[in-house]
Each structure stands twice: as C-alpha cells, then as structure tokens.
Image (cartoon, rainbow, N blue to C red):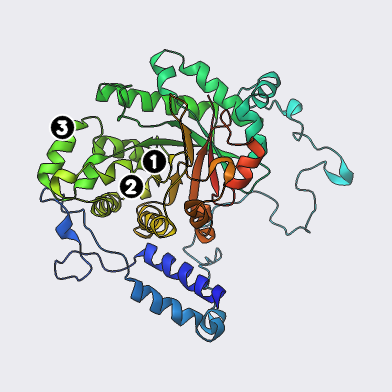
Amino acid sequence: MRLRLRQLFVIGLALSLLGIGVPAWSEDDPKSCNDLLSADTPAYVVCRWMATPEEAADIAAFWLENDGQHMGEAEPVDPITVDCTEEGNECPESEGDGEMHDVDSPDVPGAEDGGTPDCQNGDECGYVDPTGVTAAEKTAAQATPAGKAAQAVAQTNMRLWIETELADDYKAGKLAEAVKKVAALVAAQPGVVGIRFTSQLGFNQTFTTADELDKFVAETTAALRTAVPGKKLAAHTVVPVFGCGANDACKAEMTKKYPLLDPERIGAWLFKGLIDQLALDNGHLANEYATWKIDAAEAQRNQSIQVRARAWDAYAQIAAEDATFAASGTSQLTEEQATKAITERVASPLQDDAAETVTLWTRWQNDQGQVSRVYGEKWAANATWDQLKKLDSVRARLATIYDPANPEVDVATDLKNLSEVFGQVYLHAA
C-alpha cells in the first residue's frame, strides 16, 4: 500500500509539473491566472495554473488501477523511419563500412588481439588536456580541504558541484589565477557536475553598475568555459520584483531599491547561454513585502508565476534556495512547523514548476563564530532534520552547501549524514 501511494504521488507530481493543456488566452479559461500579471505585461506572456491535484490523481489512478494493467498494456510509439531507397528521399552518408559487426569487435584498426591501435595513446596522437592543468597542479588541488572533501563526496551518492566566489578575484584583477585553481580542483576529481562561481550577484555591494555586472558575468563565464569545458556554470541571486505580482507600487519600490536586479538583465544571461543554472534565493520572501500585505506564500506564488511566464527554465535550470530552516545552535521547529515549512519552501517551488531543484543551507558560521544549523549539534536528532530525511522521493532534487574547512564532526561523517537527505552538494572551495 505504501509503495502504491508513493507511485501515485510521483506520477501525480510529474503530471502536475507538465501542465500540458490549451494556452490560457481567454479570461474565461478556468485555469487562467492572467489576472496576477501586471497591466504592462507583453501580450505574448500568459499565465496558466498547473493541472489540479484532482485531475492528476484521476490520471494516475487510471494508469495504476488493476496493478498497473493499463501501463502493462501500453506499447511504445512506432518509430519514425525514412526509406532511403524511396524516390525523393535523401539520406546523408554515414561513416563506417555499412556492415553489422559482432558485439565487442574492435572498432579501431589495429585493436585486434589486445594490441594498442593508433591514436589510442594520447602522446602519439598529440592529445592535450583541455584544462591545461599539470599533474603537479592536480596533486596540489587534491591536498586542499576541498580536494580531500571532493574525494569523500565520491564515496556517497551525491552529485558534486564546486562552489566558490570569483567576484572579488575579478575586482582585484586576479580572475585568471582564481579560475586556474578551480580548474585544477575539477581536473583532480572526475565527475564534477559544474561550478557555482558567485553568490548574491547584484544584491551585495561588490558591483555598483549594470555594465560592471554584465562584464563580470560575460568575462568570468568565458574564462570558465575555456578552463573547464563541458562543466555547467551556476550563479546565485535574487529578483525582489518577482514577489510583487501585479502590485505596481511594490514593483516600483523594489526596482528603486535593487536597481541591478533587473529581470530583463538576468534573463539575458540565460538567453545568451552564459549561465546553465540560476539559483533564486527565497529568504526575502517572508518580510520584504509586508508594506503591501503580501505574505510569504503569496510572494512565493508570484515569483513562481514570473519564472514560468518568462520561460527561464527553457534556457537554464532554475533552483530555489533557502537558508531559513537553520537557526542559531540548531533548528527549533516542531514537527508540525517543520512539515509546514517543507511544504511551503521545498514542495511549493517544485510543484509550481518554478524550480527543478531546491538548495537548503544546513550549516553556516558568522563572523563572531556563532553556528547556525538545521540538524542538531554533532548531528544530534531534531524534528526538522527528521522531517527532511523523509523526502527520499525527491532527494535527487535537493541540494546543500558544505564547507570542508568548518566541519561539524569530520568531512566523512558530515557528508554521509548529508547524503541521507540530499542528492547534490555544493562543495565550498576557498
């Protein structure tokens, strides 16, 4: 019964995330939410609610009834084929000899009998490591706290990102040197997904003009693309105007207060392919809009609508980020409070299709040495952590940030415990 309910939840969630249907062009559409968009919204931007839970449950029930009979009876869609001999059809010439070969037969001349074929040895073929990182630099990177922690992450089931801050290096004229260190760390540990190269972008005081901000993003991502080809690039920021919804007074105030956080500018970074993942912080949603009587839930809904309406997820992966579960010492939430918080801050962004992943800060230390945690000190149990451990069905979508230079117990113990909740970890590299 538990497995069946879990299947029903997963299928229902997947269907609700798809939200396939007729565009909400008409105000008579019962699923239209165009009324939440401001009057100056372009005509091509429309808003439509996702499938209702009842609709998703009915569809899921159809596929699961009678022990999944309908799923068993379903057959794959016939593949689309082209007859190259038919008049009028043109097929591109493919490489190879056009003949079928046995499984495990050599695909490179000279590989028979276990020999080493030409161009399988990097030295003979003139292969050059695209990162340009030397063996000595890799060894040095492995010896750093981040390098050692990266090796420990490989022993868990978590996907690994490298988290660093390159804005200060950029301002100091040391971007190339900093990128080289990141590249060495990536080269030293196979399997790194990508690099998060900045946080609070445009929100903090590092950059003061829009041009400076744009130059940083363009030049830093270009340097990283060269140094670590094939790795995803991520950035963290906040877009306060999104929480306003259709409230014009709120939007005017947020635009004035945060001039660099223009959604059109941030969207351009995604459209140009500069950033592969954008994390939007949710910390401000709880109190930034009190003047206009917009509570956290409404602000979250407004932000979700704006993200979907702008189709940002078509250009990059969108992540929601939240640090509010942690508290000084340890989280003090009761089981009921923790469940409510998880529903609002984790489930809501995922179910609203406004985020593909959710990143939760589980531990950090301020300048005075005071530690804030989600879990208990030395991994003591508490209600919040216990509730988070129940989210195994969406573990792959949950991420956290870990600083190996400030462990709770030790790196191995910390990462093992984190892997019980999270499927991804951003490893801080100084």
Q: Confirm or deny contact between disc 2 and disc 3 (CB under 8 A).
A: no
Helix, strand or loop for disc 2: helix
Amino acid at pointer 1: Leu
User: Which of these two is toward me, 255 or 346?
Assistant: 346
What is the C-alpha distance between the residues marked 3 and 1?
Answer: 23 Å
- Residue furthest bottom as drawn: 66
Q: Confirm or deny contact between disc 1 and disc 2 (CB under 8 A).
A: yes
Residue 24 point in image, percent of width and height: 21, 64
At x 37% / y 66%, what residue is drawn?
A: 16
Asked if residue 321 lies left or right of residue 304, the reply is: right
Amino acid at pointer 2: Trp
One can see residue 131 in this view:
no
As drawn, 9 above or below 395: below
Mark nearest the camera among 2 and 3 is 3
Report the residue marked by disc 3. 256
First-in-chain label (3 vs 1): 3
First-in-chain label (2 vs 3): 3
What is the C-alpha distance between the residues marked 1 and 2?
Answer: 9 Å
Mark nearest the camera among 1 and 2 is 1
Report the residue marked by disc 1. 278
First-in-chain label (1 vs 2): 1
Residue 267 point in image, percent of width and height: 30, 40
